[in-house]
Image: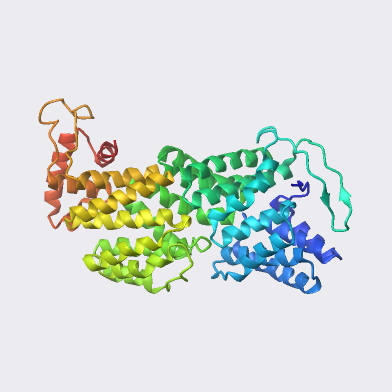
Amino acid sequence: MEIDRRAPGSQDADQLLAAADRAGDPLRAARLVAEAFVAVSRTADPATLPPMVRRLAELRARSAAPQVEFLYHAVTCAVAARTGRRLTRRDPDEALRLFTAARLHDDPLYVECAMIATLSAMRPDQVRPRFAHLVEPWLAPGSPESPTRPELPARSEPSGTVQPAAAPQPADAADLARRARLTTMLGMGDAWSGELLRGRDTLRRAHRYAVAAGRLDLQAEIVSWLAKCEALCGDLAESRRRLTEARLLAARSGSAWVGLHIAECAAALHLAGGDTDAWAGVVGRLVDSAVGANSGLVFEHRWELATHHALGGDAAAAQAVLAAIPDPPLDWPGAPALPAWRAWIAAPADPAAMAWLEQALTGLNRPVERLSRARLAWLLGAQHARAGRRADAIRLLELASSEYAATGAAGLLARVAVDLHLVTDAPVPTDGTGPGGDGTAESRATLTVTERRVAAAVADGLSNHEVARRLGVSTKTVEFHLGNIYRKLGVRNRTELVRRLLR
């Protein structure tokens, strides 16, 4: 793959668009507009992106070149995703058809736009199979810290002349920025498809390229996704560090895109950490701002928040959340289960509604739906546990555990393990060695069934009042059981209790 030395930083977008206005050749002008889009896509307000589509539409009308047609469709679907408009399949399908038919695989700009189109079409599982063999040979020479340009194959120019192969040479900041963007998309495709560990490793590699390039906007995006991956993978301390870093980088680079999506990463951290109140607050923010429109999560966020309200006994709030948006097309991630999920939200204690949703899980069989399938199994299993249906609870919680283990989501697996441990009636082992433990027989006692239920509710992030409402007892009763739990497990507060249960 040839490396484009002119690959710009975001500060060059205005100059690129001005050069596109001056360019007499529609193909050259279209390439400049596409480069400008790539340059600003991580920092621009989404509302500023549609004019680029209009520019490409005008150039498309002046040229029959397949490259122009390809760039128009690729950028159009990306802008639709970024601006929250419902995406039609025509633009990404046509872009990818032209990418193949016109043999555009040896040009880094076209490869990058094709990868963007694939992700915008919510087909992350196709990114690595379709593009890694094009990208990886170019990334291989040197390292992110001291890279070199690879020796490139000869390629034909539009005029038909053949340029000789280029010799390896040191990479510049523009090369490194391009490498960072391409590697980021490989990592995002992996993680989004349920290959969290591979995605995290690839994003770390992309981050090294972005640091070497000196591009704060690229670092902000990559670090924000790393914060989410680290939380899902179970390294909560690293996730918190990454989240703080992402916020700072977004502010320093003026990245509107990253600034808007940091909340999505924070939600993953709160969920993995068991802070239900914080998680619900952040998801409410995501719903209000329609974050996730480009990934299909705009629907899942609403259904998650509605479920939280329904299980908490606030049916009116749950229905208000769902009333604001219709079900998505059936080809969207998670869509096959959403009608059944909606029915369960309307009747969270109804075994028939729960059975329908469990049956609908079999329709979530694409790689992009693996984490959603695990999450729904977890929610259903926990609700069966609260209703005392142990066999159903264990079956679904084991399903969630298997799915999370297969995707590398150790952070969420740990949360499910708490619910599963409590519902199986296995005694919580204690050895009196925790804070406050005295090693006596009393401190080594096991928790009663009621105490396990209280502990599970606390692990879910509920307050004493919410625990009391869930179990149908008084707040004083909850406080009494918590005192016994703390004494038996040798802990002093809720935080230590959750850590003790997660061992």
Horizontal side of residue 36 vs 322, given as left or right: right
Horizontal side of residue 15 vs 477, given as left or right: right
Horizontal side of residue 122 vs 4, given as left or right: left
Q: In this orientation, does residue 304 appear?
A: no
Residue 27 versus residue 181 in the image, above or below:
below
Who is closer to the viewer here, 334 or 145?
A: 334
How many marks can you see? 0
Q: Position of residue 14 (x, y in %)?
A: 75, 59
Who is closer to the viewer here, 77 or 254?
A: 77
Q: Position of residue 268 (x, y in %)?
A: 42, 50
- Residue 183 placement: quadrant: top right
Going by the picture, which residue comes out furthest to the top? 439
Q: Position of residue 424 (x, y in %)?
A: 19, 45
Going by the picture, which residue comes out furthest to the front? 101
Residue 16 versus residue 143 in the image, above or below:
below
Residue 33 versus residue 269 in the image, above or below:
below
How does the figure colour the protein chain or chains?
A: rainbow
The residue located at (23%, 68%) in the rendering is 352
The residue located at (46%, 50%) in the rendering is 194
Quadrant of image for the C terminus? top left
Q: In this orientation, does residue 163 appear?
A: yes
The residue located at (57%, 58%) in the rendering is 119
Q: Position of residue 418 (x, y in %)?
A: 27, 44
Who is closer to the viewer here, 390 or 283?
A: 390
Residue 25 versus residue 399 in the image, above or below:
below
Horizontal side of residue 447 vs 114, given as left or right: left
